[in-house]
Image (cartoon, rainbow, N blue to C red):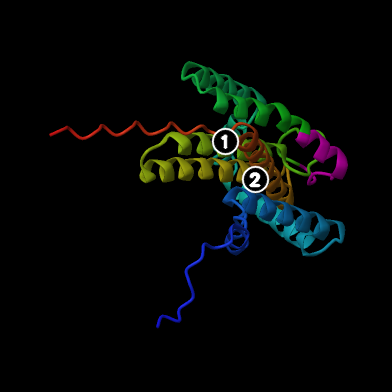
Amino acid sequence: MNLAKPATDPDPRAVRQHQGRPRWKPSPALISLALSLILFSALVENLLARGWWFALDSRVLALMEKLTRPAGATVYPYVNAINAMGGRLAIIALMVFMAAYLCFRRQWRHLFIFAVVYGSGEGVMLILKAIYHRARPPAPLIQVQGSGFPSGNAFTAMLFCGLLIYLIGAQATGKGLRWAYTAVGGFLVLAVGFNRLYLRAHWLSDVLAGYLAGFAWLLVVIILVQALWPVRETPAPPLNSPPEG
């Protein structure tokens, strides 16, 4: 005699409760954005409390003064060339070239990201400088104006190089090519930051704040565009039916 319970169909409600809703997992972009905002906030809080960043800024400035004395005219032309590369005219020329390239390739989504990043980045930098309004280091080697925190050159360098790395990474096929462009972009970002320190136009915290703010704003724009303008995946072609017979 079979005493087993008869098989019954599972309750659909129980199945849904068992499966549950798909868990939301933060993307690497969101994690990076949160981390950059946390670091920027911690940096600002430390400066407002006159913490250890003040002592570190003074030490780095003293180190830059020592580097400029023996180097003199030997290193200054190279540093000045990097300063020109990060200038407004050079950035505008690169922006026009990049926009023309994206138009030629008809990559409208990337062109939209490019336009939003630079169209809003200038405003974000002006707002941040107006909020904090920090004085620059004394006796800079170049003529500078306005607030020093955060560094506008570091902000722009991070925006431009980060955006190029993002656009190239979306198109490059090999990992080696992606790493090569990432290394070149990272070197340029660091070179611009060192340039601002060497010329005594910014404190170290100004440069780091520019990096963090530029990286955070780039991620904000990319995340919003990806949410509002998702990439449509091309459906796979149907499989051919097997031959008859």
Quick one: SS at disc 2? helix
* Residue sitting at x 62%, y 52%: 32
Task: Kindly tell me whether residue 217 is visible in this rendering.
Answer: yes
Q: Is residue 134 magenta?
A: yes
Position of residue 18 relative to residue 124, above or below, is: below
Residue drawn at 63 percent across, 47 percent down: 68
Work out whether residue 131 or residue 145 is closer to the camera in this orientation and state it. 131
Q: Position of residue 170 (x, y in %)?
A: 47, 36
Query: Dot 1: what SS?
Result: helix
Q: Residues within 10 Å of mark 2 (few under 14, many from 20)?
A: many
Cα distance, mark 2 to mark 1? 26 Å
Q: What residue sits right under mark 1 in the picture?
A: 163
From which residue to which does the magenta span run?
A: 124-139
Residue at 69% over, 53% down: 34
The amino acid type of the residue labelled 1 equals Leu
Label 1: few (<14), some (14–19) or many (≥20) C-alpha neighbours in 10 Å: many
Front residue of 202 and 180: 180
Residue type indicated by callout 2: Tyr
Mark positioned earlier in the residue sequence (2 or 1): 1
Which quadrant of the structure image shows residue 201?
A: top right
- Residue 174: x and y in percent read 36, 42
Q: What residue appears at the point 38 percent right and 41 percent down from the top-left corner?
A: 177
Residue denoted by label 2: 198
Q: Quadrant of residue 176?
A: top left
Most distant residue in the left direction: 245
**Residue 126 painted magenta:** yes
Question: Can you say which quadrant of the picture contains the C terminus?
Answer: top left
